[in-house]
């Protein structure tokens, strides 16, 4: 029986020279995406992770009290992202009706409507926080000189907002 060895004996073939030169930029963008979405879900500023997004339940603050990021430069800037997030639940309700669940299984339909309705209300601040984070990411990726992102706060501890 032939002995199987490593497919490639030269383990140094994948060096940094062989890597895609755009890889660090992609990694940084992916990391920024994950961190910002996590912070938005945690109801924190997507830029610094320290300041709150809302006062009260869903009243969006004009800017982060910690780093100064203006959350929504123009009223309605986050509308697209929040509306798409809302439509996911509306789509679930439409699917329940479309597939005839109320006709064939009325109790299951009522239970489904209650579950989806509670989930819709329960996740509203977090979905809208993710929408604000997506708007922030669109601004951060565009690097528009007319829409500057504030510099990082000195001694800022990067967080993903999980330690609330
Ligand atoms: Zn902030």
Image (cartoon, rainbow, N blue to C red):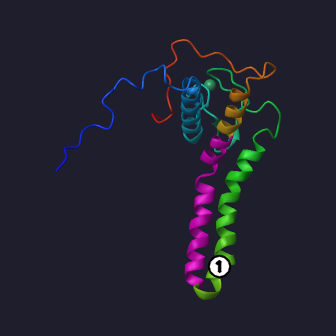
Residue 84 position in % (x across, y down): 71, 52
Q: Which residue is mark 1?
A: 99
Relative to 161, is 55 on the left or the right?
right
Q: Secondary structure at mark 1?
A: loop
Q: Residue furthest bottom?
A: 104
Relative height, residue 144 to residue 91 (above, below): above
> Is there any visible trace of residue 30 in the rendered image?
yes
Q: Nearer the viewer, residue 95 or 23?
A: 23
* Callout 1 crowding tier (Cα within 10 Å): few <14, some 14–19, many ≥20: few
Residue drawn at the location 77% of the way across and 45% of the way down: 79
Q: Identify the residue shown where x is 64% and y is 66%.
A: 92
Identified at 57% across, 85% down, the residue is 105
| Left or right of 135 on screen, residue 13 | left
Image spot of residue 48 (x, y percent): 58, 25
By secondary structure, the bulk of the magenta-drawn segment is best described as: helix
Q: Which residues are magenta?
A: 106-131
């Amino acid at each position: 029986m032939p002995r199987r060895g490593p497919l490639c004996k030269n383990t140094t073939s994948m060096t940094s020279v062989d890597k895609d030169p755009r890889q660090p930029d992609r990694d940084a963008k992916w990391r920024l995406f994950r961190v910002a979405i996590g912070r938005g879900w945690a109801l924190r500023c997507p830029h610094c992770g320290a300041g709150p997004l809302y006062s009260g339940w869903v009243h969006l603050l004009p800017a982060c009290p910690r780093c100064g990021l203006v959350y929504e430069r123009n009223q309605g800037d986050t509308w697209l992202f929040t509306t798409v997030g809302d439509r996911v639940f509306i789509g679930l309700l439409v699917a329940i009706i479309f597939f005839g669940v109320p006709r064939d299984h009325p109790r299951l339909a009522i239970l489904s409507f209650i579950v989806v309705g509670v989930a819709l209300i329960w996740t509203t601040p977090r979905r809208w926080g993710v929408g604000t984070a997506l708007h922030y990411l669109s601004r951060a990726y565009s690097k528009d000189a007319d829409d500057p992102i504030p510099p990082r706060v000195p001694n800022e501890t990067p967080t993903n907002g999980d330690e609330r």
